Structure formats: structure tokens, C-alpha cells
Amino acid sequence: MRKKIAAALAGIFVVCLVIFCLTCHGSQGAEPERENMKTYRPIPKKAEGTGIYRTKQTVKRWGWKGWEVKADAPGSLMGSNIVSISGRAILEEGGSLYAAGYRLPMAMELYGGDGVSDWEDYNIYRLKDGKWELFASNPPEKVEDRYGIMVDEGVAMNLMCYGGFLYYGVCYKHTWDEDRILDTAQFVYRVPIQGGGAEEVVETKYESKFYIYNGKVYYMPREYVREEKDWFSYTRDNVYQEMELGGENKREIYRTDMQTWGSVFALGGGCLYLLEWDDEKEWITGVNLETGDTRYYSMGGMSIYTLFYEGGYLYISSFSNTVSIFRMDVSSGQTEYLADCIEMAWRPPSEIAISEECDFVNTVWLENGYLYFMWQDKNAALERWFFSALDVETKQMSTEVLVEKESESWQEDRGYLEVVGDETAVCHNV
């Protein structure tokens, strides 16, 4: 495997202040028939002097009869966050610090420690007594042995601790053989906190989020079929399942033959929320985890990018020329605009090698009622990059300027953020 070169960190900001007010409004619409729904893309309006675009959105609902939402206990949901499937790549838990291989340079810069000069993206490392040590390893050879094909790389992500185990995912990149082309694969593993070998929990669809929610794992499984000379090596149905923490007692929550993305589903309030679409429109489907009851939300033409749930609201990133963050009250269906963020952040070479998408990179994070995000003002005479923390209830927001310079070379700048414990670390590279 290739050697790694530590990425230079140009700026780290921990934002806790409340500075100014940002007001947003939502609206509620009628309830048309499902088959009459059409998709359009709204054109956002730029809020004067802010570099931020705001759009009023209307949520239309099919067959609306109310929607039961339960209150979630603190810490009941773990896993992927708003924009990225990678979740936490640096985790502070029980007095220990863990880092996925591709974020080890950032962890070493933030918290010090040595002991590792060369690392692999698919490994998990732990800081112990001032030294980083290998804690768990899942090399691509494991997947090669299973499928009998060549696997180029792997990257670990989405670290979480629960019930005495460290859980994490590893995405592997496949090449193709003479008989078929396989999509890249993703596995969920766990390792006892006291140490030991990594145990495979389940295989999921590639670049699919997975969560631990109320003591169970929720994910999209990969279901295979054997079709000669058909590069689609898995079933075309999209399935959402829950299982026990060790992989036992798998239960199907929802199955659809509509198109979905593995990175666009959320859990909370006792429900599953996912994006579906066909040739004409897209919508969000809510599924009650206990009863199986469903509700449908047509998003009034939003082009949905990702979903995340917290405190009775579904947080939605919508993509057009930039990524805009909205939130929707899942009971009333009302939405409100929150912020714009950058779409494509800078990525270390290790991430680019395994995926040309930006799904491994955090540029937005939501936790405990605060939205942390990076954004950019391309319309000013000077290019300005910002990092902001927004209280989603009061709309109070604090902002740090990451960079300010002549705008002619703005495409050269990229950044990303990680959340570790109670701190938000922002890296900006020029």
C-alpha cells in the first residue's frame, strides 16, 4: 500500500460564541394527489449583504393523518451526520482517543503523540500514554479472499462506541474481473474496547450510512443476485433493516423498488426517513419503526442531497448551485431555511483515491441544536471563506473568517471539519 504524507493544518477554530440573529420562515401547503406531483427546482434569493441564499419552501403531504413522534433520549442516536457518511473519524470516548487512518494526521496535530510514521486508511489507531498505536486493522485482502477479485483500497470511518465495543465502517474499492463488475463494498466492524480482533457485523451497500439507534444497528444491506453479463450484481430493490448489535435478529423495516441513495436516510423520533424518486419527482418517506405506518412528504421541488434527524426536525441539505440546509417539522410539515454551505471540500489524497465523490468529507455538522458549517462568499471583491455555528432555535450565529484574499484563485482553496468531543476542528488549506 502507498505511503501517506501528513496534511498541513492551516487553521483550527473552536466556536462557542453567539453573535447575531438570522431569521428564517417556513410555510405549509396543500395536499395534492401523489400521482399529480411534479418536480421543479426553486431559484433561491440571496439575502442582501450576507452571501447566503434563502428560499421559502412548501412541503406538500400525501394522505396526511398526523404523525406520531417520540422524544429521543440523549445519546440514543450515533453515526453518520448531515452531509457526510463518514461520521466521526476522530472519536474521544472513555478517556481514550481513536482515529481512522485517513484522519490520523489531523489527530496528531490536534492532540500530539507519535509512534506511527506510516499508516493505512483502513486502520483504526488509538492514542495511549502519549503514543499512537494500531488498534484495529481491516486490510483489503479480507475482501479479496471473500470475492476472489482484486481490491485496491479501503478507508475506515464513522467511529462510535457502544456497549463496550468500538463500531466503525470500512469502504473498499473493487476492480472488475472477466465475469462481472462489482460495485465497491462497505462493511461494519466492531472491536472490544479492551482490545482484540475486529469482528464483522454486516455488509452494507457502498457509501451507505449506518446508525446505532436505541441499541440497534440500522443500515441498508447488500442483496446479491447472479445475472449473467449484468454489471448490476445486487438486487434492484432497496431495503432498510435493523439488527442487534452483534448482527443477530435482522428485521426488514422497509423495501422499495423506487430509486434511493444509501447515504440519504435518517433515524429519530421512532421513525425512519428516506429519499425516494422516480422519473418525474422525488419525495421523502417516513416509516414508523414499530407499526410500519408510512407518510410521504413532497418537498416542493427541492433537489434533496442528504437527511438527518434531531429533536422532531428532519434536517435536509438541498443541492442546486450550492448546498442549502433546511429543516422540516415532521409533525406539521413546515420547513425553514437555515444556511448555505460549500458543496465540495478539500480532501486528502487518500480520500480522492478511493472515491471521486465528496461523501467522505464533513463540511456541515449538527449536534445538540447547533449547526456548524463552512461557507463561501464568491461575490465579494475579496474571496472570503467562513466557519459558522448557528443555534437552530434562536437563529443566533457566530462566525470566524477562515481566509480573505483576492478572488481570482478561489478554486484552489478547500477545507473540511471534524467534531471531536465538545470541539469543532476546522482545517483550511491554501
Image (cartoon, rainbow, N blue to C red):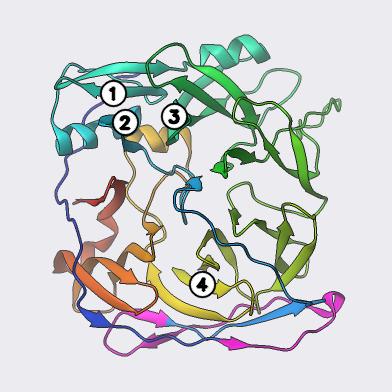
Against 28, residue 337 (above or below) is: above
Residue under circle 4?
Answer: 327
- Contact? badges 3 and 4 (CB < 8 Å): no
Q: In the rendered structure, which amino acid carries the disc numbered 2?
A: Ala
Q: In the rendered structure, which amino acid carries the disc numbered 3?
A: Val
Q: CA distance from mark 3 to mark 4?
A: 31 Å
Q: Which residue is painted at 21% across and 31% down in the image?
A: 6
Q: CA distance from mark 1 to mark 3?
A: 16 Å
Under tag 4, what secondary structure? strand
Say which of marks 3 and 4 sits in front.
Answer: 4
Question: In the rendered view, does 413 fall on the left or right side of 246?
Answer: left
Q: Which residue is painted at 70% across and 72% down in the image?
A: 297
Against 221, residue 240 (above or below) is: below
- Contact? badges 1 and 2 (CB < 8 Å): yes
Question: In the rendered view, does 95 fall on the left or right side of 240?
Answer: left
Q: CA distance from mark 1 to mark 2?
A: 6 Å
- Magenta residues, start to end: 27-53
Q: CA distance from mark 3 to mark 2?
A: 12 Å
- Tag 4: Cα neighbours inside 10 Å, few (<14), some, or many (≥20)? many
- Contact? badges 4 and 2 (CB < 8 Å): no
Question: In the rendered view, does 250 fall on the left or right side of 398?
Answer: right
Magenta includes 50?
yes
- Contact? badges 1 and 3 (CB < 8 Å): no
Q: Earlier in the sequence, mark 1 or mark 3?
A: 1
Q: Earlier in the sequence, mark 3 or mark 4?
A: 3
Residue under circle 1?
Answer: 126
